[in-house]
Image (cartoon, rainbow, N blue to C red):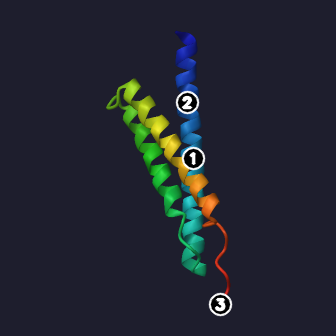
Amino acid sequence: MAIRNRLAVLVRVLLFVSAAIHLSLGIAGLAEAATRGAVILFGNYLLAALAAFALLAGYATDRLAPTAAYVLGVGLATLVLLAYADVRAFGYDEPAPER
């Protein structure tokens, strides 16, 4: 049982780090988009960060059962990976040509 508790703590720490990274990238990207008029794809980073923080908050306050939190976490991770692959496959992350 102790290993399961350690893994749960590790998952929460990794989710928090991932959410913090997505939040910082989203804010930095939106600030750059506001000053240079770049393509706004960084809203996706903010949405992923907010969803991860909501998942952490729900689990920490016992509003989510552990099984529901795990299922939602797997769904969120899958959605973020699919979004990453989609952006890379269609080249949306390339800079817009200068006019």
* Residue at x 59%, y 42% (from the top left corner): 17
Front residue of 41 and 15:
41
Residue 56 is at least partly visible in this image: no
Estimate how packed mark 2 is, as few (under 14), some (14 to 19) or many (20 or more) residues with alpha carbons within 10 Å. Answer: some
Quick check: 24 above or below 40?
above
* Residue at x 56%, y 74% (from the top left corner): 39
Q: Position of residue 55 (x, y in %)?
A: 42, 39
* Label 2 or label 1, whichever comes before in sequence order: 2
* Label 2 or label 3, whichever comes before in sequence order: 2
Q: Can you tell which mark lies on residue 81?
A: 1
* Label 1 or label 3, whichever comes before in sequence order: 1
Under circle 3, the secondary element is loop
Residue found farthest to the top: 1
Q: Can you tell which mark lies on residue 99?
A: 3
User: Pointer 2: what residue?
Assistant: 11
Q: Is residue 58 left or right of residue 7?
A: left
* Residue at x 40%, y 25% (from the top left corner): 67
